[in-house]
Amino acid sequence: MTYNIIMTIEDFIFTKTFPQRLYRHIIFWVIYYLFCLLTYFHDGLEKLGFANWIILQASEVFFHVLTQMIFCYSLLYWLLPKLWDKKRYLSFSILLIFLSIAIYWMYYLEHIFVFKAIHFHAGMKFRPTDVVRWFTLISLFTYFPISAGLTIVIRILKNFYLKQKENQLLTRENANAELQLLKAQIHPHFLFNTLNNIYSFTLSKSSEAPALVEKLSDTIHYMITDCKTEAVPLQKELKMLEDYIGLESVRYGDRLELSLDITDDYQNKSIAPLLMIPFVENCFKHGTSMTLGKQWIRLKIQLNDDILYFNLSNSKPLQPVLAKNKNGIGLSNVQKRLALLYPDKHRLKITTAGDVFNVRMEIELQTKAVT
């Protein structure tokens, strides 16, 4: 079995997993070692020759960086998490001073015992003790703050990156939970109205009842099997929309003037399930069913490249009918879902003027349909 592991630069820099974390530390200190090697220059190149000179240079820089590593890791994994992060600033400052003093003497003793032996082996005279003290002190206030500053900056960026990742994960989880709640609210709302329609036909023993039951069966099957996913094929969503319109329009007969213009060019597009149903449901429930005499509904759905254009108009009573039930739950849900699923990729405009209610919606769809 082959695993394709794709890791971005950000993931590599900030990951907590092993061995990537070890590789990251090694790469950092190798780069810093090369930086120090280029900036820490010894005289005596002509006297020693390049081979002996580079050995002397590389050896001293190695111990120089090794001491900085001890300082940095003591700071990163002891002082900062144990004291600074817990806002024990006074204790942090005192222990930082003691750590700096300890590192100073460690670095000083390296000069006296290690660097002096390296110079002696290379045939070079070592620095006087007074010069070593000043050189050690200068290094403590130059190279050590650089290495410590770099590691602290990386730590800050790492914490920020992990916090952003955590927030993104939490946002996705909240969005998924809210979407499931929204869909759970839409399903019974839609089914309640449809079952009422079928019930009225069964009471009158209409021959239309079997066809309505079949369409409702297809609709339930669609919602149970397909609406569990975040996206469904546009073809299935439009089929369910047409079934719903068929379920609703049958009981109106000649009283309803229905105009449908729905694209049949799906181009392997996918869409979030149940986004258009609440608008159509609203036409029948709060428009057609509340209006006496002749009513009309005009629906046009077109697909242009990746954009779905949804234009729905219907007649409505001039005077709004007040009710205490949850009339607005469908429209408010679809607006929330659009904001969650298609941020900056949709436009929705709902207008009402006189006896006309209109919805214009544009959605940028995914190219590949979900099957």
Image (spheres, helix red, strand yellow):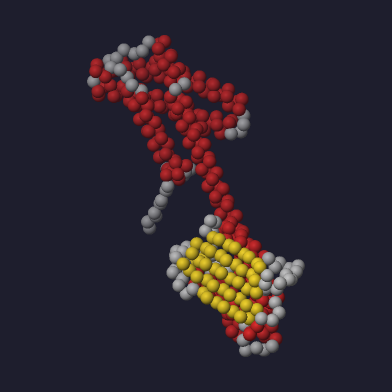
Give the camera-side residue of 80 and 269: 269
Let me know if residue 81 appears in the view. yes
Question: On the rendered structure, is 270 left or right of 202?
Answer: left
Q: Position of residue 352 (x, y in %)?
A: 65, 67
Let me know if residue 180 appears in the view. no
Q: Quadrant of residue 127?
A: top left
Q: How many marks?
A: 0
Q: Position of residue 256 (x, y in %)?
A: 63, 81
Give the camera-side residue of 224 and 292: 292
State the residue at coordinates (40%, 14%).
132
Question: On the rendered structure, is 210 left or right of 15?
Answer: right
Q: Position of residue 3 (x, y in %)?
A: 39, 55
Question: On the rendered structure, is 68 left or right of 298?
Answer: left
Q: Is residue 46 above or below residue 225?
A: above
Q: Quadrant of the N terminus?
A: bottom left
Q: Is residue 11 above or below residue 117?
A: below
State the residue at coordinates (60%, 55%).
174
Q: Is residue 274 above or below residue 49?
A: below
State the residue at coordinates (55%, 61%).
347
Q: Is residue 44 above or below residue 256?
A: above
State the residue at coordinates (58%, 31%).
84
Give the camera-side residue of 181 and 352: 352
